[in-house]
């Protein structure tokens, strides 16, 4: 086998295609010879090839002859070393099975069928809800005894604008409080209005029913008198000008006086106030010269002094006396005529004399 391989290499370089074919045909005859016995033949062959190349031009015939000579020598050499083949020939039965036969797919392709699905037909919901055992308000089933939006009847909503903590009990609204400035003054069931009363008026001042009276006004939480006035007996009085409360509650000015700057002022004709009256102490017999000094005994007040009228004499405790005809002051004060006498011309005269 080694010689064959080398020959093929040599032929590839120096021979034509026809020479290679002929040499290969010759070597097929000795293809079964053991490769270990071809060493000597390789040497003979190389010598023959060299001789052929040197002696004559290379052509197909010389190459083939050289190959035959080398092969014959190799065959003779190898034949002495080859032992007869005593192996039992292969008796196995050749495979007689037929190869798979290709059968083309004769099935028909699927035929496209358009979708003929019919959508479901809408059927309105015919579900009947449970029967409302309370009160139907619109679409809702409510308890008008406890629902603050339908308290006592559909749509009766308890107030949530001014009222706090609204609830509904037995069909009537109830509240826990009110926003500032409001109160629940009208609580007639179902009391939907809740805290609907403004409590900063004179009718409801600070609380329901707290009425401001006597000239008072509401300051938002309580009744007070306006500026410049004071409460006197539940009535606001202007102490600076009120003749019945001049300067203080209950101080009454004299009938002819006025109240000016909290003081009673009498008129110029009677400039003095004495015992609740405006008097002229220059001429008043009750207040002559001063309040409370009264003229007596027929005296009158002249220039602030108690004086007897013209023709009369001041006899002290005896008062004013006419000395010409007064039997008690005849001719002089305290000159008393007898019982049977009279005073004539300032003298005591016996009766009938």
Image: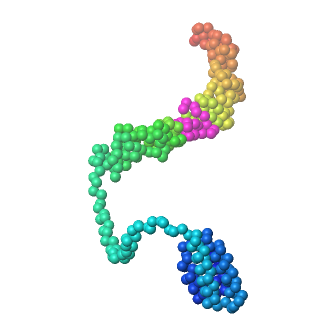
What percent of the width, then of the height, locates residue 182?
Answer: 50, 42
Q: Residue at x 65, y 27 (%)?
A: 274
Say which quarter of the image contains residue 72.
Answer: bottom right
Which quadrant, please, contains the N terminus? bottom right
> Whole-percent x and y of residue 308?
67, 23
Residue 256 visible here: no
> What segment carries the magenta color?
213-234
Q: Compared to 172, does 322 lie above or below?
A: above
How far across and down, in percent of the image, does residue 271 sit?
A: 68, 33
Q: Is residue 204 above or below residue 154?
A: above
* Residue drawn at the location 68% of the way across and 87% of the way down: 52
- Location of residue 313 by image quarter: top right
Q: Nearer the viewer, residue 225 or 177?
A: 177
Q: Where on the picture, by quarter, is residue 166? A: top left
Q: Residue at x 65, y 29 (%)?
A: 273
Q: Quadrant of the C terminus?
A: top right
Magenta part, dominant SS? loop
* Residue 225 forms part of the magenta stretch: yes
Q: Nearer the viewer, residue 125 or 114?
A: 114
Question: Percent x, y for residue 136?
Answer: 31, 49
């Amino acid at each position: 086998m080694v010689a064959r391989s080398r020959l093929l290499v040599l032929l590839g370089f120096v021979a034509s295609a026809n020479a290679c074919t002929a040499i290969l045909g010759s070597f097929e005859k000795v293809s079964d010879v053991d490769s270990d016995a071809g060493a000597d033949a390789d040497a003979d062959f190389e010598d023959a090839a060299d001789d052929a190349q040197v002696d004559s031009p290379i052509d197909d015939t010389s190459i083939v002859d050289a190959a035959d000579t080398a092969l014959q020598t190799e065959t003779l050499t190898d034949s002495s070393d080859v032992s007869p083949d005593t192996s039992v020939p292969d008796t196995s039965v050749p495979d007689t099975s037929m190869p798979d036969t290709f059968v083309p797919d004769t099935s028909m392709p699927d035929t496209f069928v358009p979708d003929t699905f019919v959508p479901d037909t809408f059927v309105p919901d015919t579900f009947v809800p449970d029967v409302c055992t309370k009160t139907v308000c619109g679409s809702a089933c409510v308890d008008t005894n406890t629902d603050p939006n339908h308290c006592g009847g559909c749509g009766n909503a308890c107030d949530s604008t001014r009222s706090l903590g609204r609830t509904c009990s037995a069909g009537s609204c109830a509240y826990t409080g009110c926003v500032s400035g409001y109160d629940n003054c009208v609580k007639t069931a179902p009391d939907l209005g809740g805290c609907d009363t403004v409590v900063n008026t004179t009718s409801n001042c600070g609380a329901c029913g707290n009425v401001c009276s006597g000239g008072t006004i509401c300051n938002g939480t309580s009744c007070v008198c306006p500026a410049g006035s004071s409460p006197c007996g539940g009535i606001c009085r202007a102490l600076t000008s009120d003749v019945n409360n001049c300067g203080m509650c209950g101080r009454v000015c004299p009938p002819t006086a006025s109240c000016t700057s909290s003081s009673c002022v009498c008129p110029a004709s009677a400039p003095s106030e004495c015992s609740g009256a405006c008097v002229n102490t220059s001429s008043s017999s009750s207040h002559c010269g001063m309040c409370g000094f009264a003229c007596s005994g027929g005296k009158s007040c002249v220039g602030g002094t108690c004086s007897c009228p013209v023709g009369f004499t001041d006899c002290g405790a005896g008062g004013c006396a006419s000395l010409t005809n007064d039997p008690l002051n005849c001719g002089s004060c305290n000159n008393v005529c007898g019982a049977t006498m009279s005073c004539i011309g300032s003298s005591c005269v016996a009766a009938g004399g």
